[in-house]
Amino acid sequence: MTSALTIYLVIHVLAGLAGTAGFYGAWFNLLRGAKNFRALRAESMTGLIMILVSWVTGAVYYVTYYGATVKPLIKAGPYPWAHAFLMEWKEHVFLFLPFLAAVVTIAIWRVSPGDQLPDGTRRWLGWLCGLIVFLGAAMALAGTGISGAVR
Amino acid sequence: MSWSVILSILHIVGTVLGVGGATMAELLFRQARRDQVIDPSEAPMLRISYAVMRFGMALLVVSGFGFFLLARLSGHSEWLYEPRIWVKLILTGIILGNALLLQVRKIPLWLGAAVSIVSWYSALILGAWRGLEWSFWMIVTVYLLVVIMVAAIFRQSEEPRMKQP
């Protein structure tokens, strides 16, 4: 693997964690009543930017290296399901997650800082943040499982 | 200094802050609740304990995934399939989920406190016990039994106060 791809992989993982952490913070904030609206905006925007960074770096790694080098190793190794199931699942969520993160962030940023988030909106945004955190954590676990299958 | 040493230092500091923060938060909270009221002088200490615990968790997660990357990049991927690593990952999720449930009061305090303390100490023990050869389910079973035991103790210790007029 080239140095550039190594850096992309490291950024992909760390940015993914930071993105999930951003939306975990936003979820926590929403559950507390979204009283700190500035923090909520910062958390959601940080989460979105980090998820996008993870998306781009992961895509470069996947397209230029994973398919040609890593995938055959996993398929020939003792855990071929790590590609057949985990990576296939991860690919689909990977396409969907940034859009979900963008929807939540745009919804939060459209509310003026002085205004109060209606309870119903706050509850639904909380559920969406929870979904992003759950999917982000599941993707981190799937990534660990895929990496462990490279023998 | 190698990446392995840097990550080890971060992981140890994260564990110390996380386990220490969880222990102090629990002790301070129990002390504060003796008179049923958390007064203004006690609140800042609790907030500091929770902040230390959160910082410890952030360090643990970052350094933990740093170790995963190092294993993958140095060709030691087999380490990622060790049962204690997966239990530690699940414990991280439990600690974060428990914090949210406590925040929205969807879990009784005695149970949330037991889950938090036992999870933090379990992660510490699993990290330190390198030669542990138990299966995933064996570790999970022992963890659940300890949670039940500690929860029962915490529940029992809350009851006399709950009956006070």
Image (cartoon, helix red, strand yellow):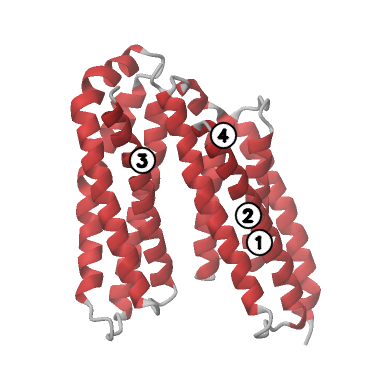
* Residue B49, placed above or below residue A133: below
User: In the figure, is residue B110 to the left or right of A148?
Assistant: right
Label 1 vs 4, first from the N-terminus: 4
Mark on residue B5?
A: 4
Residue designated by label 2: B17
User: In the figure, is residue B65 to the left or right of B25?
Assistant: left
Element type where label 1 sits in the image: helix
Residue A42, percent from left and from top: 32, 67
Mark pair 2, 1: CA separation = 17 Å
> Do discs 3 and 4 share a chain?
no
Chain bearing mark 4: B
**Foreground: disc 1 or disc 4:** 4
Residue type, numbered disc 2: Leu
Mark on residue A13?
A: 3
Label 2 vs 1, first from the N-terminus: 2
Identify the residue at the far top of this view: A76
